[in-house]
Image: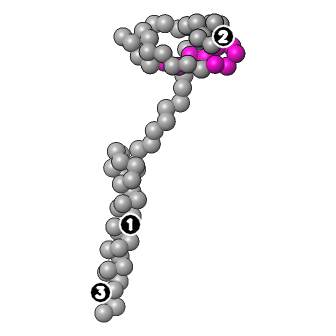
Amino acid sequence: MAVLFDFKCPNGHIHERIIDSSVVSIQCPMCNEQAFKIISAVNFSLDPISGHFPSATDKWAKHREIKIKEERKQANS
């Protein structure tokens, strides 16, 4: 099965390649050295409330702030 992997050579060049998961090294396209498979950090974030949309917490907080102001205004009337 072909998967996207990062490879790094001894000279520090990092390249992505869609390749079979059993492959552990490739030739670096920049310097022709052997580049080996590395584990890369995944860059993503999940919303703590919904688990899906990063803006959901901000939207909920703004909506809640408006509701609190409305409730306080009604209580003071």
- Which quadrant holds residue 77? bottom left
Say which element carries label 2. loop
User: Residue flagged by tag 2: what amino acid is it?
Assistant: Cys
User: Residue flagged by tag 3: what amino acid is it?
Assistant: Gln
Mark 1 highlights which residue? 62
Asked if residue 56 is among those painted magenta in the image, a careful observer would answer: no
Say which element carries label 1. helix
Give the CA distance from mark 1 to mark 3. 19 Å
Q: Position of residue 59 (x, y in %)?
A: 36, 60
Question: Is the Cβ of the residue at disc 1 closer than 8 Å to that at disc 2?
Answer: no
- Which quadrant holds residue 66? bottom left
Range of magenta residues: 5-13
- Which quadrant holds residue 37? top right
Q: Measured along the vertical axis of the image, is residue 9 above or below residue 50?
A: above
Question: Is the Cβ of the residue at disc 1 closer than 8 Å to that at disc 3?
Answer: no
Mark 3 highlights which residue? 74
Q: Position of residue 64 (x, y in %)?
A: 35, 69
